[in-house]
Image (tube, grey):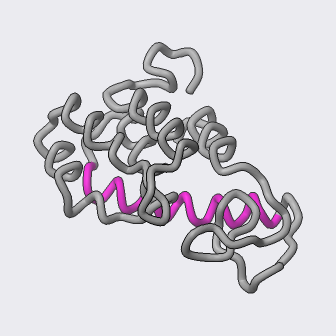
Amino acid sequence: MDPRYLDAIKKSEGYTPRASWDYKQHSSGYGTKALYPGEVIDQGEAERRFSDEIGKARAIVDGFAPDADEGTKAALTSLTYNAGDAWTRSGLGQAIRSGDTQAARDLFMQYNRAGGAVNEGLAGRRQREAAWIGAPLPGGDASQP
């Protein structure tokens, strides 16, 4: 995965050395599940955990949409990393499978809730990521995500 996408995902997650509650789990580092509440990790461990978990998310995306362009795969990898793979069994998954880029962007934007309510941070993140869909390079214009 292009490092610019990875950097954008890490920027969206933010770095937190001490685990804190994040809607459904205690998270630390770049949004990875902490081993226990209050766990403190260093930057190196955060990077290792991020790499491990983003790799698992990417494997799900590659298995579901092996022929998708890199931008679409990056957006879906970020979504999977952040929210899981339920999208593969929804309208978004159907749009991806059928190659309907505009429908995929529109449906992608609906993954903006945390705890049942629209979260402005997630809404902004999804808007940035939706722009990657259909783009061969970060940002859709070979500039930056």
Task: Identify the residue shown where x is 41% and y is 33%.
Answer: 71
Task: Identify the residue shown where x is 24% and y is 38%.
Answer: 104
Task: Identify the residue shown where x is 63% and y is 44%.
Answer: 12
Of residues 82 and 140, the one nearer the viewer is 82
> In the image, residue 107 lies at what x, y percent?
26, 42
Q: Is residue 54 left or right of residue 85?
A: right
- Furthest toward the bottom, the residue is 36
> In the image, residue 103 lies at what x, y percent?
19, 35
Of residues 48 and 116, the one nearer the viewer is 116
Which quarter of the picture shows residue 99?
A: top left
Residue 52 within the segment the image draws in magenta: yes
Q: Is residue 61 left or right of residue 16?
A: left
> In the image, residue 46 lies at what x, y percent?
77, 62
Q: Is residue 71 above or below residue 55?
A: above
> In the image, residue 60 lies at what x, y percent?
36, 62
Q: Is residue 30 above or below residue 37?
A: above
Residue 10 within the segment the image draws in magenta: no
Q: Is residue 21 above or below residue 76?
A: below
- Furthest toward the front, the residue is 117
Which quarter of the picture shows residue 24?
A: bottom right
Which quadrant would the C terminus be assigned to in this image?
A: top right
Task: Identify the residue shown where x is 62% and y is 37%.
Answer: 8
Q: The magenta stretch spans which residues?
A: 45-65
Q: Is residue 40 left or right of residue 108?
A: right
What secondary structure is the magenta-colored segment mainly? helix
Label tally: 0
